[in-house]
Structure formats: structure tokens, C-alpha cells
Image (cartoon, grey):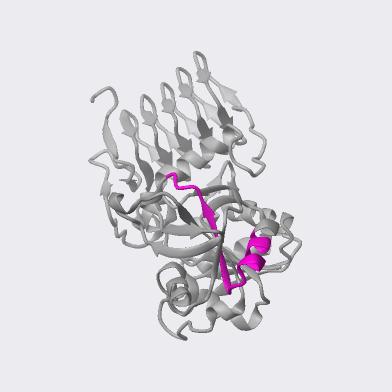
Amino acid sequence: MQAVILAGGQGTRLLPLTLHTPKPLLPIAGRPLLSYLLRHLKSQGVDEIFITGGYLGHALEDFVRRDGTSIPVHVVREATVRGTAGAVADLAPRLRSPFLVVSGDAVLAIDVKALAAAHQRAGGPATLGVMAPVEQLRFGIVDVADGRVRRFVEKPRIDELVPGLWVNSGVYLLDREALAGVAAQGPVDFARDVFPGLKAAGHPLGAAAALRFWRDVGTAESFRDAHFEALTGQWPWPAPPPGAPAVTGAQVVIEGPVAFGEDVVVGPGTRITGPAYIGSGVRLGPRTEVTRSVLLAGSRTAGSCSVQDAVVDSGVLVPGGLAVRGAIVGQTREAHGGRQPLGRRARRVPARSAGGALLASLDRVATPAGVG
């Protein structure tokens, strides 16, 4: 079976982490998300994979060349934005029915055999993988009865939530017939355009609870929490074995599940309270407090600072005396040779923002340590 991984989005909800890294290549527990996904698909019998790439597509191509996956993996660069269905429709001449479509920004475990069986029973051109509605207001909802889709509700209001609704996970098993009406130009979306159109035309659409696990990692909160699930054994993919700090100063306290990459240096008087992930090459200055946070490879903290419920991007310095709560600490685009469009909810750190640091999302609070 073939699979298409959708990886063309810009990841604006994960800024500034995605200024220099496409979402599927963001590391979770030291390994790119895409690396886990490729291996999971292979384990489910997928023998050829296409990755649709637009934003930072060259980084996806470089990764595939280095990754060494033993099945054919092709990165197909989008010349223009085509949306989820448009990007797949452009690949139609290279696809065999049925084929799998998955999002490149999710941790998931698919039972492909169960999805294929549901597809055969439904007898239509498309079958959707659905999940129980945990955070249903954030996602498109599918009304299912007897294994078939009755209607779609895109990010519903509270008063639209009734029994029998499931979350559309973005995992689909499709026949090429499902792509027949997709326009050759412009953006086209599966959930908003293709599936409602097929339903209106009288085609049966299947739905199956064929995912053993699914977590969207398209937001800073979910990206951070995916690390915690990896550390505590809640997610379905094998996480790299945790390391240990190479150098530990005096009066260091490490509590709860904490994993370290290689060559981590922890300064004296530092406290780390898990769940927490400290990536390779991280340097924690003296009297640093880290609580429920993720520090990616090569990041640093100066002395007497606090990082709580946060994500610190690779190579970024958290200035001394700063308390970071519920934020992403990343780099501005100026640090990469361009101007940074901060985007929704992103704000610069006040005067202490040495080194081009940026705080964004996650209801950020940045104050001098010990204040507020």
C-alpha cells in the first residue's frame, strides 16, 4: 500500500519553532516526528511513501536523503498552495487504489487492516479514520452511523455537540475515484470540499475507529505534551533511551520523569521537576529551575532563571534572572537573516531579549525571576 504524508503547512501555531524547521521535522524526545511516522507506516505494510512539501521543502528533502528508510520515500514540492486534497490530487497519476493519507504533524498508531476492512464494507471511494471526541471543539467532527458518515461539522459550537459524533483525525483511506472532481488549480480541502461533495453526490463514505492512538502536535501545548507522553510510556512509538547529565554540580535536584540527551551540563543549585525533556548539548546555568518543560538541543539557560510549562527552541539562550511560564522561547527571523513576522499572539521579550529571543503562544508570562 502507498501512503501520502501531508507536510506542506507553515506551522504558524508553532511559531517561532517553525521559523527554521518544518513541523514534521520538529524533534520529539530527540528524533524528528517524521522519522517516527515513516517507521510506523512501514510497520503497517506501507511500501511507498509520498511527502507533499511546500514550506521549507528543501529541509524535508535533506532529511529523506539522510534518513535511510528502506522503502521508497519521495518528497514532492508544491509549486503553489493546493490544500490537503489539491496536493494529493496532483499525485493521482502515481497512486494506486486504495492509498492512505495522513497528516505529518500527528503522533498516531493506525490499524491499517481495520481501516481497509471498513473501507471495503462501506463500498465508497473514501473511509475516514475517526477518534473519540476528547477536544472536539478544536477539530472537525464526523457524524457516524453504522460505519458510514452521515454529515460533517467543522469545528462545531457547543450546541451542535450530540451523541454519535467523532473527531476527524485526518487519516483517510481513498480510492483514486475520490479525487476525480478536484480542481486542477487552487486550494482544495478534503474535510471542507471533497468529502461533503462526495456525500452530496450520493457516494457512501466509510468511517472507522481504526486509530489506537492519535495526538495532534500542531500547537505548542500539544508539542510539549507529546514529549511528556513519550517519557511516561503513553504514546505508541518507541522513544530513544534517555541519557544522563554528563556533568552535575552540587545541590542539584531531579524529580519525576526526566529524560536527557547526550552531553548535557547541569549547573549547581539547579532543580528539574518532571515530566521534562532536556535535549542534547543543553547547558543549564547555576540555580536554574525547570518544571514541566522541554528544552531542545543546544539551548542554554543563564543563572537564576526559571522555565515552567514551556518550550525552549534549539540554540536559544534564556537570559539570567528571567522567569518564563507557559511560553515558547525561540529565535526571531532576524537571527536567520530576515525579518520576523511575529504572527498571532507572538510578542517580543522585554529589554532582556538578548540574542534575538522571542516569546510566543502558550499564554506567555515573562518576568524577572522571583517576581509574579
Q: Quadrant of residue 370?
A: top left
Give whichever of 120, 357 is nearer the camera. 120
Say which quadrant the N terminus sits in: bottom right
As drawn, the residue found furthest toward the front would be 146
- Name the residue rendered at 43%, 23% in the picture: 286
- Name the residue rendered at 61%, 64% in the picture: 62
Total numbered circles: 0
What are the residue bounds of the magenta stretch? Answer: 115-134
- Name the residue rendered at 44%, 72% in the picture: 83
User: In the figure, is residue 370 to the left or right of 151?
Assistant: left
User: In the figure, is residue 269 to the left or right of 229?
Assistant: left
Q: State whether residue 315 appears in this view.
A: no
186 is within the stretch colored magenta: no
Q: In the rendered image of this protein, does residue 42 appear above or below residue 1?
A: above
Q: Quadrant of residue 362?
A: top left
User: In the figure, is residue 238 to the left or right of 227?
Assistant: right
- Name the residue rendered at 43%, 72% in the picture: 196
Say which quadrant the C terminus sits in: top left
In percent of width and height, residue 105 lies at 51, 55
Q: State whether residue 269 appears in this view.
A: yes
In percent of width and height, residue 227 lies at 53, 39
Q: Quadrant of residue 304?
A: top left
In percent of width and height, residue 95 lies at 65, 77
As drawn, the residue found furthest toward the top would be 251
Q: In the rendered image of this protein, does residue 311 appear above or below residue 19?
A: above
Give whichever of 151, 368 is nearer the camera. 151
As drawn, the residue found furthest toward the right would be 70
In percent of width and height, residue 30 lies at 59, 43
Give whichever of 21, 79 is nearer the camera. 79
132 is within the stretch colored magenta: yes
